[in-house]
Structures are given as structure tokens and as C-alpha cells.
Image (cartoon, coloured by chain):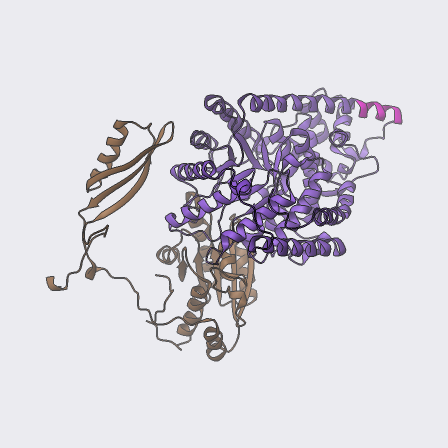
Chain colours: A purple, B brown
Amino acid sequence: MPGPFVDDTQIEFARELARETTRPVLDLIRRHTTVSIERTVLRLFGISGAGSGGVPLANVMVDRLHQAGVLNRGAAYWYGRAFQLGARSPGEAADRLIAVPLQKLPALTPEVEARMREEVRAEARASVEDLRRRIKVRDSLRDELGMPTPPHKYVIVATGNIHDDVDQARAAAQAGADVIAVIRSTAQSLLDYVPHGATTEGYGGTYATQENFRIMREALDLESRKLGRYVQLTNYSSGLCMAEIAFCAAFERLDMLLNDAMYGILFRDINMRRTFIDQYFSRRICALAGVIINTGEDNYITTADAYDSAHTVIASQFINESFAKAAGLRDWQLGLGHSYEIDPARPETLLLELSQAMLVRRCFPDAPLKYMPPTKHKQTDIFFSHAYDVMADLVAIWTRQGIQLLGMMTEAMHTPLLADRYVALKAASYIHRAARGLDREFEVREDGKISERARAVFHAAIDLLEECRQGGLIAAIGKGRFGDVKRSELAGKGLEGVLEKSPDYFNPLLEILEAI
Amino acid sequence: MSSAGRQILRPYGDRRDDGVVQLSFTFPIPLSEKAREAAAQFVRKMGFSDVKVAAAEPAADNYTFFVVYARSTVQLDYAEIHAPELVVRKLGFDQLNASIEKEIGRRVVVFGACTGTDTHTVGIDAILNMKGYAGDYGLERYPWFEVYNLGSQVPNQELIRRAREKGADAILVSQVVTQRDVHVENTRQFIDAAQRSGICGRMLLLLGGPRVDHRLALDLGFDAGFGPGTKPSDVANFIVHSLLKRAGKEPKGLHYQGEPQ
């Protein structure tokens, strides 16, 4: 354990401040739902197809309910009513809901309505059981094959074509990758639907679709068996479809998801309310599915300066942790994000980076943590760039990071070549092998530069958390406290998809998730 | 040109004119002696001699990664190479502000955005944000620049409309994602929209990004292109010098350090 740097009571105080900061937001979350959450409920009932023009049926149905002004009762309620009207399958239910003037339907008698709700609940329970069985398949393969000791080496594939991604992912796994991330197509986070089917065209990445998830997980299962070690798969539960992506990922047995309580607000200009409400539901699904979340604090210090804004990372991690715990996630699922991003032109950056990584480890001893490589100050001199990445490898093993994204020596130029991944994996394997146990051999002196810096960053984080508690998280974001990006509560994309729940709102999936 | 003026240029490995070049590449085949020989032949076919396959490693079951050293017999006459490189001057932070105040007499208005579907603000932020990049202050820090950074995923028309509203002097378009040349397609659309709105020739149109160079930008119809390693002060100097040239306050042929080439 690094440090102590600061007393346990101070860390507990930071946690308490974060809890008080997130409490009013959680009240907002409880009172609202979103189109994305309601579509997730319909997906649970098996409405995962697409209609004409590739528009997902869940979108067609939810848009219809939203336009009719009745979505605030919950899509599950209307799904039940469709069966009352004679539908015999999810597909028929979709047809009924689209055809019938919903506002004009007479209210059900209390007995009939109670019975209808019980039937829908029973169907939801059966669907969740099915989901759990799928997750068990993943867990037993993971147990059978095993995973190496962390840090787990995480690399990215991003060809745009899922079949090419499979080739590159298998090659990366053979070269030693423990986690494969399929980068999403540029701007997918702003789509208010999840595209359908296998895709072969994407820009800067590959569309996240349920079918693409299935194709990649299946390929990695085969590769894992061949290699005799389990290779994990991750994608991105962010943007306007956090909850749906979480559900599709859980269903297709993904292991991790990028999932942050504030990232969409700050870096994609998605409305605050929408993001807060969606992140809660998506994290409930991750909690059920044993998915490890990766948070995005590393992004703060690509827009803001990594030295001056180090405390914002720590403060945000406490806030992200608080939101995560409120959604039922456990410590082992918290891949809190941070990174090796201090300007290498400064003196003593290795000390500063060690200090920061040790402080994060000290504050979150049981979380896996997600450590990002340098990006902002990467150079096109690939030889320097490679040496720079290797320093991040050293800090990762020294501070026992659970998940380490490997830097690519061509980071500043293009999406990684196959050989770039190989070279990065080879170097990281060497550094991890060479330096394992370093943290147990050296103690950090409490009166030295590393400790001094850790204390200064921690106390600045406490000050920021105090500000968030007093003025509210929304006001703090409005002042640009995180990542130097300012957002306001009613601006940004997707607010029109936020609804206040009616008193008789019905969501059996949420009932199950909250009862776990 | 007389032979006396010739300047023979060849790569320098560890001795003058040895012509040593390092290469690395990957073949989509498993590692074998045959694969190694294929790599050597490939490099010889490119015209190299003394080919040494220094490393042949299995990057994956069906991919072999090579590091090769070889000598090139190609030589150039450096005297025959022409590229505009008349380093005249580059003004520092205070000098540049003073120059705007004195010669232009008002704040220079700059708009910037990462347009199209590109979500990466890292480039435009490096140039515009207060903090800047590599110890070089961003344009927001200059009191005589008025900067509007619209962020990412801004439609081209929107950027042009807002720049016209404020009577901008320069528009900076950043393109980070370059897969399948999406940056070229999007910037063509930007130039089309700029031509339709009549701002070409009136506002400075600058393009920046990791795969951008000055020539590409000029070909696309921009006034300049800034590639990797560009500092905010390079862009600031270019804008001010260009405005002064347009106003006839600086000679047309003037060049300065950091100018895109």
C-alpha cells in the first residue's frame, strides 16, 4: 500500500463529501426516466429487431409512446396493454402500440391492471434469469481459463469493419493483450439509437451494435480457449444510449464498459439530466451483469493541464464512486480512470506521475483502476514516444494498476498499425515482468516530494468536493471545474428525451435491479 | 549548374554517405526462414543493397514483424532542392500583441472548431486554449486576439455563419480523425460552403491536424495548413503577418520562422 500520505479519516471525509454531492442528483434520477431507459426495458422483452430503414423497433415504439404523451407511465405498462389488446408476441405488441390511439384507451380496472403488471413482472423476471444464465457462461469460461495477474494490458482495435476488427483483436490477443476494446465509430455517442446488425463501415472505429458485440465475443472465446487464458472485451456505454448499450453488452457477455457519470456532459455536450439519469440505470445493469466500468477522468487532463488540474481527477473519482455505489456496483467493478499526462518537458515528471498514481491507489485500494497512457504530449518521433510509453508501464506496475491501456508509439499520427500493438505489448510485458514487486521493496518517504505532492493534490480535491457539496455538482460543472469545460443544466443534447415519471410509472426491470 | 555547385546528399548512418536506412514493416504470414528471405527480397526490390534483416518476430500467429537495415544507392543533389524557407522573424507574445495594437488597431477575431463528425478537440484546444501547448500560450491568452472556440462536431455551415456574424479575421478548422480520408471529404465541404458564402479571400482559412500539411491545405483551397508539432505562436504569427500583408503593411514575399511550408 502506497502512502499513507493522508489519514484514513480524511479519505473517509472525501467520500462523505462525495455522497452529499451526489444525493440531490440521485433524487432527480429517482423522479425521472428517459427514452433510452424505456427502450432498454423493451429490449429486455426481446424487442431487439429493426424496422424499415434500419430503425430499431424499440425506438419506433418509444417514440410513438413519447409523441402520444404517455411514455411517463413506462414502456412496460404499454407493453402489457398491447398483450391485453390481443398481441401474442413482442413483435405483435410493437405493431399494436404503433397502430392504436393510446390516449383513448380506457383505464383498466384495478384488478385487471394488477394482474397485467404481475404478468409483465413475471416475463421480466424470466428475461433477467435468461440474462443471468448468459453471464454465468462468461464467468465460468473466465474461471476455467483464468486471467493473468494485473495490470491487464488493454489495447484498442478500430478498423471500422467488425470482421477486420476480429482479425486484429485475435492478433493482439496472441501478442499478449488481456483486454480488447473496439473503438466506436466517431459520433456514435450522439446517436439516440443503437444501430442494428453487423457493420463494416465506420469512421475512426466500428459501430457498437449487439450483433458486433456477439461476433467479437465469440471470436475471443475461441481465441481464449486456444491461448489457454481468458481475453476480456470492452466497449463504450456512453453518449445518448448508455443504458441500451449496457444491456446489449451484458447480453453478449462483455467484461467491461466505459461508463462515466459525467463524461457525456463534459466531452460530448449531452444534457446533464439525461446523462445522470441514464448512467444510473446503465450502472444498475452493470452491477447485475458483473461488468467492470471504466470511468473517464483521464480526459480532464487532456483538455486541462495535467499538473494544475490533478485534483479534479481525484475529486471526480470520489463522485464517480459515489454514483456507482448508489447503483449497486462493488469495489472490484470500479475501473476509475486516470493517466500519465504531465508535460514531459517539466522536471521530475516521473515523481509527479508516481505521486498521482499512488494517491489514486491509496484512495481506492480495492478498485481495479484504469490507467491511461500519455496522449496529449505524444511526439511523432516514435522512438521518443515508445520510451515515453514505457515510463507509464513502469508507473502502472509500481502502483498496481488493474487495467492499463497501452500507449502506441504512433499515437500522434494514425490509428495503430498491427506492429505498433505488438511492440507496445512486448515492452509492457517486459516492464511488468521486470518490476513486479517494486512497490513492496521501496517505501515512499513521507517527507519527500512524492508525498508532499500527493497531500497537496488531495487537499485541493477536498476543497473542490467542498465546493461541489455546497454549491451543487451542477453549479460546479457550470463553472468549468472538471476538464475546463462549462455546461449548464438545461443545455446540451438529449434533454427532450427526459421525462418525469407519472405516479403509476411501471418498470419491472428497475424493480428487479434495485432489489438485488 | 556546374558540377562544382553540386551537393551530393545521402543518408548518414555512422559514416558520411554510407546511405544506411532503417525500415520496419509487417507481413501477413507466419514467421519462418522463408518469411525472413521474403523480407530481404522485398527490401532489395525497393533498390536497397547490403540488406540486413535485424529482427523477424512473430507479432501474431499469422503476422511477422521485421526490422531491417539496408543501404540506399540513391543520391540527391541538395543544391537542386527548392523549398521556401526564408526565415525572417517570428514575433514573441508581447511583440505580437504590440504589433496588432499598433498596425491593426483592433482585436483580431479568430474562430476555431473541429468540424464534421470529428469529436477530438485536442488539436484545436492546443492552439486556442489559454494554456496552449508545449509551454507556448494559446491564442486565448493573447489580449489582442478575440477567440471563439466552438469545440467539436460543429457543422461547417454553423462555423461559417457564426464567424461571419462576428466579422472574423480567421477561421481555424481542425481535423483529427483521418480514417479513410474523412478529413479530406469534410474539409472539401467546408471550402464549398466557404465559397458559397463568399468568405474566401476575405477571411483567412486555416486547416490543422496530425495528417495535414501546408500543401494539402493549399490544394483543398485553404490559405495555410498546420501539421504535427505546430505551436500556437506559429498560428498567431501566421495570422498577424497575413493580415499585415493583405493590408500592404508587410512585403508579400516575407517569411518567418514557424510558417507552414
Q: Residue furthest bottom?
A: B102
| Drawn side of residue A220 relative to residue B14, left or right | right
Residue A450 shows in this picture: yes
Residue A153 lies, in percent from the top left, at 50, 36
Picture quarter with the N terminus of chain A = top right
Q: Which residues are magenta?
A: A110-118
- Look at the image and say whether residue A116 sits in the magenta stretch: yes
Residue A82 lies, in percent from the top left, at 75, 26
- Nearest the viewer among A161 and A182 is A182
Q: Residue furthest right?
A: A110
- From the viewer's perspective, is residue A399 above or below residue A79? below
Residue A190 shows in this picture: no
| Drawn side of residue A323 relative to residue A222, left or right | right
- From the viewer's perspective, is residue B215 above or below residue A159? below
Picture quarter with the C terminus of chain A = top right
Residue A136 lies, in percent from the top left, at 63, 22
- How many marks the image carries: the answer is 0
Q: Residue furthest left?
A: B3
- From the viewer's perspective, is residue B252 above or below residue A102? below
Residue A244 lies, in percent from the top left, at 64, 34
- Look at the image and say whether residue A276 sits in the magenta stretch: no
- Nearest the viewer among A494 and A29 is A29
